[in-house]
Image (cartoon, helix red, strand yellow):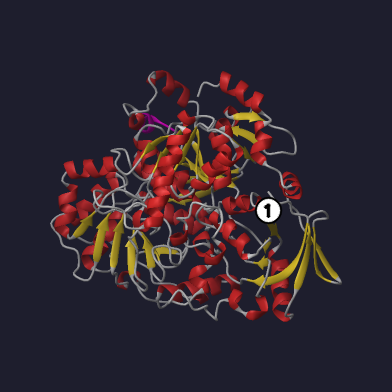
Amino acid sequence: MEPFRVHQGLVAPLDRAHVDTDQIIPKQFLKRIERTGFGQFCFFDWRYLDDNLTPNPAFVLNEPRYKGASILLARENFGCGSSREHAPWALSEYGFRVIIAPSYADIFYNNCFKNGMLPITLAHETVDDLFRRVHAKEGHRFTVDLTTNTIEVDDDHTLSFEVDDYRRKSLLEGLDEIGITLQSEEKISAFEAEYAG
Amino acid sequence: MPARTMFEKIWDTHLVHQESGRPALLYIDLQLVHEVTSPQAFEGLRLAGRKVRQPGRTFATMDHNVPTTDRSLPILDPIAKQQMQTLTDNCKEFGVTLYDLNSEHQGIVHVIGPELGLTQPGMTIVCGDSHTSTHGAFGALAFGIGTSEVEHVLATQCLLQSKAKTMEIRCDGRFSPGVTAKDLVLAIIGTIGTAGGTGYVLEYTGECIRALSMEERMTVCNMSIEGGARAGMIAPDETTFEYIKGRQFAPKDFEQAVARWKEFQSDEGAVYDKTVTIDVAALAPQVTWGTTPAMVADVTRNVPSPGDFTAEVEQKTVEHALAYMGLKAGTPITDIRLDRVFIGSCTNARIEDLRAAAKVLDGKRVASHVHAMVVPGSQHIKKQAEAEGLADVFRSAGFEWREAGCSMCLAMNPDVLEPGERCASTSNRNFEGRQGKGGRTHLVSPSMAAAAAIEGHFVDIRDWN
């Protein structure tokens, strides 16, 4: 996995609560057998009009000012619903490396870390404030630094965030979790030898 | 030893290794696999030159993508066909048992696990599907995982996990007639919200839960994820043991197994991080009106208005939901007219669900403007329903009788709503576009769906005949 250390990028605000993984990547695109090719279908049903071709001008990510965004500002319970890892695959391939929201669904949150993407949790009021700032200033970019757990929002405004130590280390080093678990081979074998279940 | 919850007991018996500052390494008893979330996991194994560590603890079937029409016909969608073929090839290459389209055991992964006796108390069970919580009905710790974790479990039979908090959902009292397990779980989600269970494992307790059949318990645990909880569980009892007894993968020394299973109960005095109490006797049949399962109301109520909610974000969410659903605030739920009815899914496609719907439909006809279909949860259920005469009841009432699969619960296969179509569905999610782009889903119980099919709009099953 590609390590994540520092990322600077344009911020796009998706001002909706409970964005579920069916919105992030609709089911009709889950038939691929690869990990790639999902970015083009990210937010498909919101992104395109009913002809499935014309970009929907009312959808925020289609606004020219957010073209090339790599930090997604979102609302509570982001990524709820299905466990499909296709959701972080799609977001990542679309260009997002960081998500900032007040809360996430568990499975989605976990899946992000497996794909080199950093979901940051901040208080509701802080997220509200970020929405205001991003709406107010076109071309607003943040610098997210996982080595210091900080987000530079503006020259004079830096926020800190918390993330579980293990997950942080996994991202910083781009760890291969399976490889690490397989180093515990003896412990797993010993467990299996004793195990009655 | 201090008093422990059932969750903690299962956790402790599966703990392979715990290092401070790292998640626990947990042993997984059973992994269920399906065609949609597994191809990239098997490919990962292949690229790294790894094997499936315990093929005997791994079982696969095809459910998400499969057509529910005549199985002797070729599959028309070439991409779906390729995904199914990929599962076949992967299972062959890695030595995993597969119940494919032609197997008598084929069905929705969360229906066939219990049906075959694979799902047992005290187990840890995972699957690349969020409704894996279903298996918690047997007193197992069962939860959905992403594809990277599917690969991790295939390779190591273990999973890295941080310990969740526990929430007791105590369900006191008994159902009044016409109220079902589906109404209970919808009401629970309405109470705790779609994120209320985030970070928790739910344990359903109380008089009502003890009286539920296994099918009903599965319906309840199935939708735990819609309340944000990855897992929901119910302590095993005689009902559980009776269900498992005699099934294909039931333990050979059954009595000994039962003695062990009986230990997976929360101890008296065990402490939950949170407790929520539900007054079951006061419950009415539930109907969702919005685009999350928590947007739910008693069938006797009206569609709410954004002004009924206090937080601004919530008001906006409700406004969006009503616009998407094409509903006006204040409309009585029973005035909502339907185009489609879907009885199926891992929530409500078991034999008891089909019996409940058939009982309502017996001798009646589906409204002329309604297109209705039943998709049994498995081939076994289909056969059993045909033997019991239920299939004839459905067909005579004007329902289509289909082959087993996930079907219109997520509409990956050709069973899809047209834009603007409104559907009463026994499934678990009413998200935008879930059953087809622009489709409008109302979640209800099987008997409520059946009665709505006949009338062409929702009715209160309690005073309808």
In the figure, residue B380 lies in which quadrant?
A: top left
Q: Label 1's element?
A: loop
Quadrant of the image containing the C terminus of chain B: bottom left
Q: Would you place residue B47 above or below residue B415 in this image?
A: above
Q: Is B27 situated left or right of A129 in this image?
A: left
**Which residue corresponds to the image point at 64% horizontal and 27% vertical from the top-left?**
A185
Is residue B243 visible to the viewer in this orientation of the structure? yes
Q: Chain of mark 1?
A: A
Quadrant of the image containing the N terminus of chain B: top right
Q: Name the kind of residue labelled 1 in the image.
A: Gly
Is residue B139 visible to the viewer in this orientation of the structure? no
Residue B94 image offset from top left, x and y in percent: 48, 34
Q: Would you place residue A61 above or below residue A29 in this image?
A: below
Residue B222 image offset from top left, x and y in percent: 43, 47
In the figure, residue B244 lies in which quadrant?
A: top left
Which stretch is magenta?
A: B235-241
**Which residue corresponds to the image point at 51% horizontal and 56% vertical from the top-left?**
A81
